[in-house]
Image (spheres, rainbow, N blue to C red):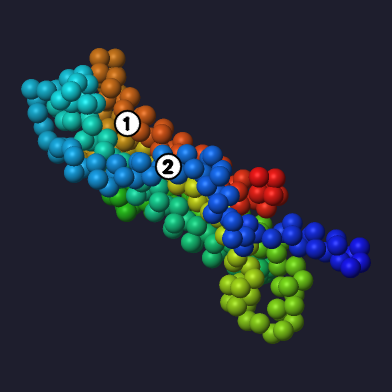
Amino acid sequence: MTARDDIDAVEADSVTPIRDDPSALRLMMRNRGVFWGGMLLAVMVMIALFGPLLTGDPIALNPIKRLKPPSGELFFGSDFLGRDIFARVVYGARISLVVGLAVAAISVAIGLFIGMIAGYIRILDGIIMRVMDGLMAIPAILLAIALISLSGATLTTVIIAITIPEIPRVVRLVRSVVLTVRDEPYVEAAIAAGSRLPLILHRHILPNTIAPLIVQATYICGSAMLTESILGFLGAGIPPEIPSWGNIMSEGRTYFQISPWIIFFPGIALAMTVLAVNVMGDGLRDTLDPRVARKM
């Protein structure tokens, strides 16, 4: 084997995605960020799925128990209408997780398609990216509030309003990967062999975007949950009759000095969930990076 062959072998190994390695799952589990972030997120998902079976009605009014502090009967206390904060926080977990996962899935799907087209078809690149730059120039919260005010505050509207500002970030990420990969020898060989554009994108371009998109999706999920809570806190998100962490804290801010638990417990739940998603995203980033994975 010549020196040139050795160099080629090293270069090929340096760009091999870790997902092609059968030990990828083991590496992920060995990463503390992936393990502990995933465990904490799994606990929050279990609470969202099965917690309502163990709690009462989150919208049931009980004026006799209004503004009661945490106790054995009311674990998280009650609000100004006597509603159980624990039940409302548990039900609010469903809203935050649904919004986070839906926004991440939709924005990644749409951004992947647009980014691959923009990165591979040069004539459309400038047009698409100028549109994406225009969307990114508008603050995400203001754009979401504007969209919700035009169509009304529902769960579907909130998801759409949060998804639109996230799409340009995914497009830019995918486009940067495509611009790097499209000049690789194997892509040029596929073009020379007469492969159609959809086949080239699916077989040669798409696999290289999976790892960074998985990491990006975790950050989008955490960001979407924060944005939903901000919208709810501002009164522009989920309707008040549907418990969400944002509107629970919004309703409790008037009574914060005398009943801080109304804001404290949903705030802790939000912080723990977003922390779990971000820690898991950091771990996935380290694991899916071939250079870091080899050191591990």
How dense is the environment of label 2, judged by Cα within 10 Å: few (below 14), some, or many (20 and up)?
A: some
Q: Position of residue 97 (x, y in %)?
A: 36, 46
Q: Give the alpha-carbon distance from disc 2 to disc 1, as whole Å.
A: 20 Å
| Among the two numbered marks 2 and 1 on one chain, the one whose residue lies closer to the N terminus | 2
Q: Is residue 3 left or right of residue 66?
A: right
Local secondary structure at mark 2:
helix
Q: Is residue 50 left or right of residue 23?
A: left
**Residue 278 horizontal side relative to residue 116, left or right:** left
Q: Where is residue 53, by image quadrant?
A: top left
* Rendered-image quadrant of the C terminus: top right
Foreground of the two, 164 or 35 = 35
When the figure is inspected, residue 228 is found, relative to residue 25, above or below; the finding is: above
| Extreme residue toward the right, this view | 2
Question: What kind of residue is marked 1?
Answer: Pro
In percent of the image, x 22 and y 30: which residue is there? Answer: 85
Residue 211: image location, x then y, percent? 58, 56
Q: Amino acid at mark 2?
A: Met
Disc nearest the viewer among 2 and 1: 2
Q: Is residue 192 visible?
A: yes
Determine whether 113 is above or below 247 in the image. below
As drawn, the label of residue 132 is: none
Residue located beneath label 2 in the image: 39
Q: Which quadrant is home to the N terminus? A: bottom right
> For mark 1, what is the residue?
266
